[in-house]
Image (cartoon, rainbow, N blue to C red):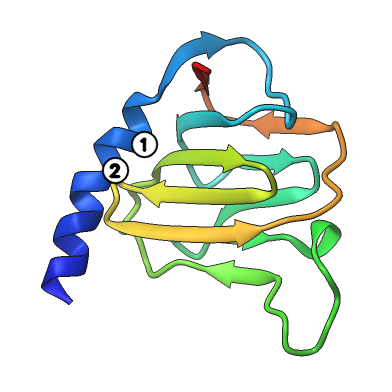
């Protein structure tokens, strides 16, 4: 287990550094990184994939952009975060990877049929795209 954590921490800067062009808008046509600090009133709706804070946890909801089966979990909640909600979110072809508080926790979600609507409320954020 310790080797996996160690290799993950070595991989994270390589992923992070490949997103080096800041842009003003999110497009699901290309990989992007979104960096922000959330608060209890923040919410993100990224093409139907929803992220917010509930009971001191990061809450991910992909009901609108996932299959609907009994054994598929479309609501995912992080452990308690003690009021600290820094996230780096990476998107690449139907996959979201969310690094919470510098990689203390990582959450992944596969999504389908994202719409073009992006709503980001009560947070300042920066979006970067990967140079190709």
Residue at the spot x=58%, y=70% of the render? Answer: 76
Work out whether residue 58 can be spotted.
no
Question: Which residue is disc 2 drawn over?
Answer: 12
Which residue is rendered at x = 26% and y = 35% of the image? 13
- Vertical arrangement, residue 6 with respect to residue 29, above or below: below
- List x then y, in percent, for residue 68: 86, 76
Asked whether the beta carbons under mark 2 and mark 1 sit within 8 Å of each other, the answer is: yes
Please indicate, yes or no, whether residue 31 appears anywhere in the rendered image.
yes
Q: Where is mark 1, residue-wise? A: 15
Residue pictured at 46% horizontal, 31% vertical: 36
- Up the image or down, 129 lies above or below 115; here it is above
Q: Position of residue 3 (x, y in %)?
A: 13, 68
Residue in the picture at 50% in, 65% down: 55
Q: Quadrant of the N terminus?
A: bottom left
Dot 1: within a 10 Å radius of its alpha carbon, few (fewer than 14), some, or many (20 or more) residues? few
* Pick the front one: 106 or 21: 21
Total number of numbered discs in the rendering = 2
Residue most toward the front?
132
- Say which element carries label 2: helix
Mark 2: few, some, or many residues within 10 Å (few <14, many ≥20)? few
Q: Secondary structure at mark 1?
A: helix
Task: Measure the C-alpha gap from mark 2 to mark 1.
Answer: 5 Å
Q: Position of residue 92 (x, y in %)?
A: 60, 40
Q: Is residue 60 left or right of residue 56?
A: right
The image shows residue 123 at horizontal and vertical percentages of: 54, 29
Query: Which is more toward the observer, 44 or 74?
Result: 74
Position of residue 130 in the picture relative to residue 85 (left or right): right
| Rendered view: 120 above or below 4 | above
């Amino acid at each position: 287990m310790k080797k996996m954590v160690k290799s993950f921490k070595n991989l994270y800067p390589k992923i992070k550094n490949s997103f080096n062009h800041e842009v003003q808008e999110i497009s699901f046509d290309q990989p992007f990184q979104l960096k922000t600090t959330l608060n209890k009133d923040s919410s993100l709706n990224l093409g139907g994939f929803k992220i917010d804070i509930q009971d001191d946890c990061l809450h991910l909801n992909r009901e609108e952009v996932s299959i609907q089966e009994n054994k598929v979990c479309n609501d995912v909640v992080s452990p308690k975060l003690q009021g600290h909600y820094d996230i780096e979110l990476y998107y690449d072809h139907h996959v979201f990877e969310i690094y919470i508080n510098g990689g203390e926790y990582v959450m992944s979600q596969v999504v389908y049929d994202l719409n073009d609507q992006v709503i980001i409320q009560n947070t300042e954020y920066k979006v970067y795209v990967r140079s190709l």
